[in-house]
Image: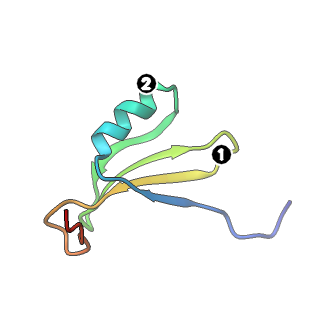
Amino acid sequence: GGGGAQVRLWLQVRDLAAEHRRLAAAGVPIVRAPQREPWGLDEMWIEDPDAIPIVVVEIPPEHPLRRDQR
């Protein structure tokens, strides 16, 4: 302990609503439900059992970061 930078994980998914349903059904505590951020990304916040913050993010189709060529 002590002194280090806090770890945070960002995970990109294709379907945030589906992941929200799946994680909630599995009993994963949802810290913040999915919502559109001012910068245009859809995010949901969860934590792992060691309290490491995890941001689950979906890039909407109209967002300039979207590069999905499917």
Q: For numbered disc 1, what is the local secondary structure? A: loop
Q: CA distance from mark 1 to mark 2?
A: 19 Å
Q: Which mark is residue 37?
A: none
Give neighbour class at mark 1: few <14, some 14-19, many 20+ (Cα, 10 Å): few
Instruction: Tell which of 18 and 1 is nearer to you.
Output: 18
Residue at the spot x=31%, y=46% of the render?
A: 16
For residue 25, which quarter of the picture? top left
Question: In this rendering, which labeled residue sits more in front, label 1 or label 2?
Answer: 2
Image-based side of 37 in relation to 64, left or right: right
Instruction: Identify residue for label 1.
Output: 51
Q: Amino acid at mark 2?
A: Ala
Image-based side of 57 in relation to 37, left or right: right
Count numbered badges in the picture. Answer: 2
Q: Position of residue 36 (x, y in %)?
A: 25, 54
Instruction: Identify residue for label 2.
Output: 25
Image-based side of 8 in relation to 70, left or right: right
For residue 18, which quarter of the picture? top left
Q: Amino acid at mark 1?
A: Ala
Instruction: Tell which of 8 and 12 is nearer to you.
Output: 12
